Image (cartoon, helix red, strand yellow):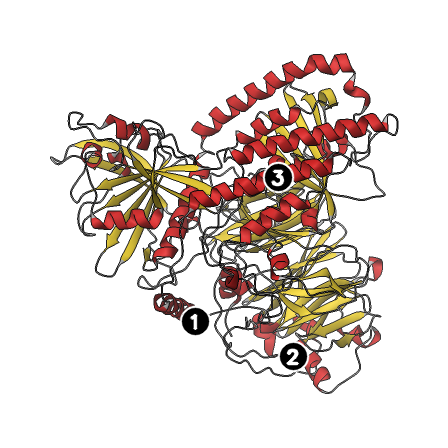
Amino acid sequence: MSSVSEDLGCRRGEFSRKHYGSVELLISSDADGAIQRAGRFRVENGSSDEDSDYTPAVWRRTDVHLENPEYHTRWFFKYFLGKVHQNYIGTDTERNPFFLSVVLSDQNNQRVPQYRSILWRKTGSQKICLSYCPTKTLSVKSILSAMNLDRFEKPPREILNPEIQKDLLVLEEQEGSVNFKFGVLYAKDGQLTDDEMFSNEAGSEGFQKMLNLLGDTITLKSWIGYRGGLDTKNDTTGTHSVYTVYQGHEIMFHVSTMLPYSRDNKQQVERKRHIGNDIVTIVFQEGEESSPSFKPSMIRSHFTHIFALVRYNKQNDSYRLKIFSEESVPLFGPPLPSPPVFTDHQEFRDFLLVKLINGEKATLETPTFAQKRQRTLDMLIRSLYQDLMPDLHKNMLNRRSFSDVLPESPKSARKKEEARQAEFVRIGQALKLKTIVRGDAPTSLATTGLCRREPWESQSFCSNFSYEVVGADSWGPSLLVSTDSGVLLIDDGRPAIPVFDKSLQIKQMHVLETLDLLLTRADKGKDARLYVFRLSAIRKDLEDNQAPRNKYECRENKLEKTKGCHLYAINTHHSQELRVVVAIRNKLLLITRKASTAGSAPGSSPGEAFQYIREICLSDPPLVMTLVDGPTGENDNTICVAYRHQFDLVNESTGESCRLHHVDASRVHFVAAIDVYEDGEAGLLLCYNYTCSYKKVSPFNGGSPLIQPSASDFHFSWNQVPNAVVCAFPYILAFTTDSIEIRLVVNGNLVHTAVVPELQLVASRSDIYFKASTTKGSSSNSSSKDTSSHSSPQTPTGYDLPTFPSTPEEGEVQCRNIYKIPVCNLVGRSIERPLKSPLVPKVISAPTSGVITCIPVTHSLSLSRMEIKEIASRTRKELLGLSGETVSKSEGAQRQKQLIRKQGEEETKQDAVRSTSTDRINSESFESSEGQRHCSTSSDPESTVSVEESPPCSLLYPTTSLDEDIVDLK
């Protein structure tokens, strides 16, 4: 039986920032050995840690995602501009002006209305989503309170001037450019100074091959696309350059050998003027691995923060990558594989471009750039405030402020209000059109070629599940679900089997297969208790077709001293000793069960193996409780509890408590406290309101945790308040009422948001199960074009991806299903091995071509080190055996960009015509047309597979199109 510590490593992965490199002091010297410069850089070379389970010769794949892509982060351009919305102005208690924009939007055209709000302050913009309730009014004050802005020097007043949209669009553009410019420097073998590298007149055959891989060679004269600071009129910066479009981003490369060369200028100032002012630079170095390698300190530049060192091996036609990042640059992905060698050139191109784009955006968060952006934003906001204040007093625009319902217009002067809204929309759509034409629009055209399945895509597990879910946990490949009608055991494609009847109302449960135990909390109030059952006994009842157990038959399974409990928690590493902490109002009971008692007599009660240890009193009843394992397990285990406005850490042995984190907010909604272990040291992800904060809990001093600010602590914000949070390294998933928000643990950057109406997380200790609504319509024959408009460019459009409308239309039947996200897809690949089901044993067949088959996994997901190595070895063989497919990088990229602008111009004009007679603008035309462009990366009509011809697919909730997702900047 494998240990649960291995389960933790497989289920959550190893929470380690070492995958993103380590900081080193790099010193460069000249040919004589004299030291020139030195600097501290984080070096990523893909090398495995000494204690890692991966062997150096095994390729470890990593998922490649654009982090916080601009077509997600530019909320004002995407959701506000050209649509009816409201803007407010005010000042806080420190007399700093702020702007607030609010829009009532349809969540991805799936009839899930919600409020989107942007708060503009000198420190940056804050974005949140709020649920829409037709019976509950929402005021500006409540929105600002959700953003922790409760007190004002001057309360917010509405701005009715439509020209405000232009100014707010300028504020949003301060967040960074949609397009990018990267330097490309050619270095011959043995060159150790930047003067030598910049003096190379021409590159080698391998260098030219890399340039052809990166993009297309274009003529600069009369170039009308993104120019990246190059001269397109007089050829003063060269005659040609390299250009590409990647996932909607225009990229211009400043190639050293294509920039003007001067024989009289040893320093090549003209070349350094461009490449030295690029934040990110690719350095292509010739020579063998044993030859002296490039170091960032060789380049004299205070602006370049990231260097990507590329070497080409002609013998095996592969590229090796190494990344240098200045010490202050935050972590960014994707982490390099081990070893960082790419034999698939298209894979290398995708990885390199994503790494460079993420790196430049991460650099903008360094103190140097952040302070400049903050000063610029502060100046723009104050200037705009001074311009608007006279109009505010003159026009008395304070008639609508705190208490007004946002989506409603005043009933008086309705015609005047409708005319104002029509003009408001016309100006906004004109601004959107102008932004598209000049090429600064955050479009999401995918130019990466082939689509791929994302690791978070779900599968159907149980259809038409009409019961209300109270709690659940996985049991092998099955799911044990507590409902309002009793406890049911459900399996994929099988009828539900009752286990307990509704007389036993189970509120919380844990299936512990390694201990042959089912631990539950049943009933409520004074009658609440903990019950312990043997899984083997339940399995025997199922095999014998016994009637479901009732509450009276479970009286022998009660756990003593737990009457009146409202919450309990168990330790993650329970293979050696199971620890249970039971909360009874403000009292905590610590109960343990030794692993050696697993072989107790069959006739004895399973509760007899548990022993009461001690009682700990708190000041208030805990709302969230998590057990944290100490490094030794000897008097250093702790309990994290959340109540009032704080998270406390309580020592299990002494009962001593200390403050872990204080929540500075008027109202607190505690979500979770997740125990994670970074490089073997305990840490906690504290989730509350819109915030997720990581706190390191180490070292331990005399049994008491030492809590102090650490450089490793970090925090990030969600777009919407989650109801539950699940950590599966490298991802962390937030489940809200209508969406799944997926971010990276190490930096909090968002990678995807899936819209799932009426969402409820069911279980997550192994695979992730959730319940959601979907509809079945009488007319389900939709064309492939219609299907593609609701699909992500990274999702195969040949599969049927149903939508999730919140209210069924005529001819539609709404049903609620249970879906599953295999954790093995999130943290790595799973081994195909048979599982023991509490129901009928399954026969696992090999996947057939054209059909997406998911191999079920056990609840513990515990893999041995040999199995993990087998996964890595098999993955490497598969990747090396793949035939390289020719995928167009950016051929015709400029033509594609012009097509985007032309389509956007036509669609925006059409929107303007339609909007003149309505006060609520339908955004489906513009958004859906963008969605069609996302998926129409191929002009071949035969490349689109119709729904009727598509193979069956296990994906049941939509990976929504990129234009339909939501994102936060942090």
Name the one closer to the observer, 587 or 809.
809
| Residue assigned mark 3 | 78
Q: Is residue 509 visible?
A: no
Q: Measuring from the top left, give residue 74's x and y in whole percent.
A: 58, 37
The amino acid at mark 3 is Lys
- Outermost residue, bottom side: 544
Q: Earlier in the sequence, mark 1 or mark 3?
A: 3
Depth order, front residue of 802/116: 802
Q: Secondary structure at mark 3?
A: helix
Crowding at dot 1, Cα within 10 Å, few <14 / some 14-19 / many 20+, comes out as few
Q: Is residue 134 left or right of residue 670?
A: right
Residue located 37% across and 69% down the image = 873
Q: Which mark is residue 587?
A: none
**Other residues around mark 2 within 10 Å, as few (<14) / some (14–19) / many (≥20):** many
Q: Which residue is mark 2?
A: 838
Tag in front: 1 or 3: 3
- Where disc 1 sits, the SS reads helix
Give the spatial CA distance, label 3 vs label 2: 49 Å
| Label whose residue precedes the other's in the sequence (3 or 2) | 3
Quadrant (top left, top right, bottom left, bottom right) of the C terminus: top right
Circles 2, 1 touching at the beta carbon (< 8 Å):
no
Is 691 located above or below residue 141 in the figure?
A: below
Where residue 682 appears, as percent x and y from the top left, is 51, 51
Q: Indicate the amino acid at tag 2.
A: Pro
Separation (CA) of disc 1 from disc 3: 46 Å
Return the disc, 2 or 1, that comes first in the chain's sequence: 2
Instruction: Determine contact: label 1, label 3, CB under 8 Å.
Output: no
Question: Among all residues in the image, which is located at the extreme left?
Answer: 32
Q: Residue at x 65, y 31 (%)?
A: 428
Check the image and report above or below for 870 versus 150.
below
**Disc 1 marks which residue?**
867
> Dot 2: what SS?
loop
